[in-house]
Image: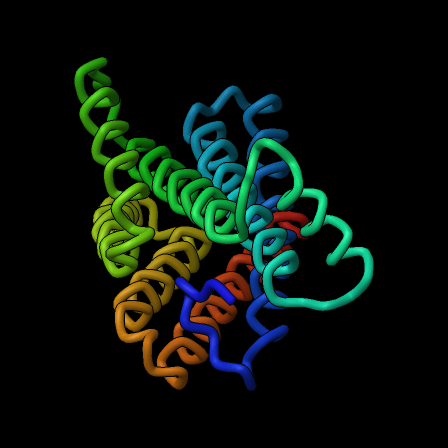
Amino acid sequence: MVKIVFTPDWFLGKDILIEFFSFVVLLIFSILSIKGYRLKKNKSLLGLGIGFGLIALAKLSSVFTKLVLYYDSAPVQAVGQAIMTSQVFSSLDIFYYAGFFFYSFLTLMGFFVIYKIPHKKVYGGDYVLILYFIVISSILSKDLFYLFHLTAFLFLVLIVVNYLKIYQKNGFENTLMLIIAFSILALSQLIYILSKVGMFFALSNIMELISYTILLFLIIRIIKHG
């Protein structure tokens, strides 16, 4: 069994439920943000929609990859067998590496898009350099798993700093909730670095769950109050 993510046996299944919950929350947030953009033509909402949408796709990629690798139900076995016997993937290792790459790449791209929202000046060279950095980080993370989490942590810290500046100007509770959610998510990435110890892997997942639960409450507030 390939095990780049160090999921303890007693936590198998729970991690997938958390990631699927995160996917649903992120997808709803993305849809609401894009709808808000269409109504108000606010590019910040569009950036949030795209950013959260990319992270939602990353979560879906992770869920699908883990289902194929770790579970023994007949439908999942059939999918896994079809993948292994196809010409695209010759082994479970390659399948896992591909799934982990897309998860890492889409997550980091999503964080980058959210980070860039407050910055009005955009330079083409910035995107080329950051895209190169993200691709390299995603590729190397299959062997140096902590590199992805460290990169995600840095992006999240920058995002929190951006929203702190915004909160100082507007004082909105919704902005404060975003700050809290991203701060908890950033801390979870640091704990992921210690995920070879099963307890820390479970703790980081629980912190992610708390972060996305806060986003769910934020979604409810937006639906109720706008």
- Towards the viewer: 102 or 53: 102
For the point 57% across and 39% down, the residue is: 30
Figure check: 173 above or below 139: below
Residue drawn at x 34%, y 68% as measured from the top left: 188
Q: Is residue 62 visible?
A: yes
Looking at the rendering, which quadrant does residue 10 occupy? bottom right
Q: Please state if 102 lies on the left or on the right of 213 as rendered.
A: left
Tell me what residue is drawn at x 68 percent, y 51 percent: 80
Please tell me which residue lies in front, 212 or 220: 212
Q: For this rendering, which residue is in front, 61 or 164?
A: 61
Seen at 36% across and 67% down, the residue is 184
The percent position of residue 191, horizontal first and vertical second, equals 30, 72
> Would residue 79 appear left or right of 28 to someone viewing this image?
right
* Residue 15 x/y as whole percent: 55, 70
Q: Is residue 168 visible?
A: no
User: Which residue in the rendered view is the most extreme toward the top?
Assistant: 124
Q: Residue furthest right?
A: 74
Relative depth, front residue between 3 and 202: 3
Question: Where residue 18 sits in the image (x, y, percent)?
Answer: 58, 67
Marks counted in the figure total 0
